[in-house]
Amino acid sequence: MAIKPKKASENKEKAKARTTFQSPKGMRDILPREQAWWQRVMKTSKEIAEFYNFLRIETPIMEDVALFERSLGLDSDVVSKEMFYVRAGGKDRYVLRPEGTAPIARAYIENGLHHISQPVKLYYEGSMFRHEKPQAGRLREFHQLGFEIMGGQNDPIYDAQIILATHRLLEGLKFKNLQLQVNSIGCRVCRPHFRKKLLDYYRKHERALCEDCKKRLKTNPLRLLDCKEASCVALKEHAPSLMDSLCTSCSSHFKSVLEYLDELALSYTLNPYLVRGLDYYSKTVFEIFVDGFDLALAGGGRYDYLFEMIGGRPTPGVGAALGVERIIEVMKQKEIDVPQPKKPRVFVVYIGDLAKRKALKIVEELRVNNIAVKESFGKDLLKKQMQLADKGEAEYALILGQKEVFEESVIIRDLKSGNQESVPVLKMVQELKKRL
Ligand code: HAM
């Protein structure tokens, strides 16, 4: 069931009673101590995107609800259970985006991107929102990095290139033992035949299906294949295979994708049960896993009908998205190191009010000269400041006392050896640069 806003009066009463606040369930603050991981992931994704000539795109965080209803499908879990409606001006036509592909296809159509050289290769990163049951690796606000190739020919080399960029990004983050699973879910020609075969099979076994799958039988039979309930998993073993039902065009497209992957020496597993949960997919679908982590780090596929579903002209497309929180969780589990931010090598220490004022100016002079510096303004005690300089692993302290202020000088102290020298403020930058 979709999540609809409560009445305003109910909310007002609750707001009055509140004394403490927490981030919304399933949504997290990304604190300074997390930033090194985030920056590492963002830096690598930018390098990969630029290398493979993807151009960055950003779209709004909300979209018209109909965009997702039409493209992901009314019966998809995302649309039927997980949308966050935004109430504004008495209407709730907008939802927080649950994924990035449909919005980018909308932007492609709306901005006439078919007029530029095709295909258009785009990459993006940003928050997505799904009202799921929060648990490890499953959040309500999560971040995706994505690659999309839109327009041009329906060429299997683009499927391979998307898989390659996604794989290389994870490799660039030092992930080992990646498992790439691939499948083809056919097209408008062959999928209806497969759907019929699947229905014939499952109708015979309806009683053994879980409650959700009984519903899926009516709404989205393909999804029966990715149910994780034991009774449904057992039934799946003998279910008809998609692979046997592909038409000539889908089969040859898929064969070419696999040949490109072979050429690239990217190992993969054929998973005939991989169907993905969104209506816009056709032909190639894939997911990437890593050893010891059950959830997919990345997923994607081809979506040649998406543009028509949302009012555009027929346009081929293929893409993938990676989950940043999942990636970071695994990096931590596997103790993949990330470079910590460099600490400033110079620490400014002051004694007394007058020196405090001058110290403020000295920090500015160092900024102009590109010398990273730390201070602890507000902690006036000399001992405290010196302790902080040591803790921050600075190599040099710039010390300003009353005497230095009057003489327009500053003491440069080597914090390791304890040697120090008084130098005129005018020569401070030059002297520091000699030492750094
Ligand atoms: P998706 O498989 O729904 O595909 O999501 C892609 C990735 O986002 C997943 O593999 C996972 O890492 C991450 N993810 C999804 N849901 C959550 C969650 N609740 N919490 C944390 N991480 C999550 C798509 O969204 C498609 N738009 C991908 C695509 C791009 N297909 C073609 N182009």
Image: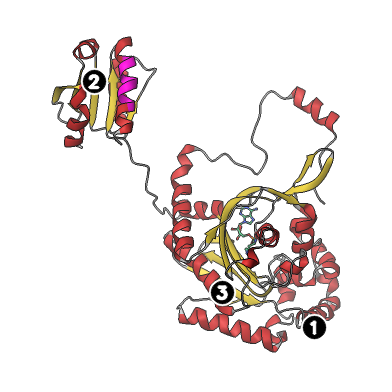
- Label 3 vs label 2: CA separation? 60 Å
Q: Earlier in the sequence, mark 3 or mark 2?
A: 3
- Can residue 392 be seen by looking at this rendering? no
Q: Of the residues shown, which amino acid type is indicated by label 3?
A: Tyr
For disc 3, the marked residue is 158
Q: Quadrant of residue 397?
A: top left
The residue shown at (18%, 26%) is 427
Q: Of the residues shown, which amino acid type is indicated by label 1?
A: His
For disc 2, the marked residue is 399
Ligand 1 resides in the quarter of the picture at bottom right
For disc 1, the marked residue is 193
The residue shown at (66%, 49%) is 60
Categorize mark 3 by other alpha carbons within 10 Å: few (<14), some (14-19), many (20+): many
Mark closer to the observer (1, 3): 3
Q: Is residue 93 left or right of residue 167?
A: right
The residue shown at (32%, 32%) is 368
| Residue 89 spot, x, y in % from top left | 82, 38
Helix, strand or loop at mark 3: helix
Q: Is residue 224 left or right of residue 290?
A: right
The stretch of residues the image draws in magenta is 356-364
| Residue 222 spot, x, y in % from top left | 76, 72
Q: Is residue 203 above or below residue 426?
A: below
Q: Are marks 1 and 3 in contact (CB under 8 Å)?
A: no
| Residue 94 spot, x, y in % from top left | 77, 47
In this view, the residue farthest toward the bottom is 248
- Label 2 vs label 1: CA separation? 81 Å
- Label 1 vs label 3: CA separation? 27 Å
Q: Is 362 within the magenta?
A: yes
Q: Earlier in the sequence, mark 2 or mark 1?
A: 1
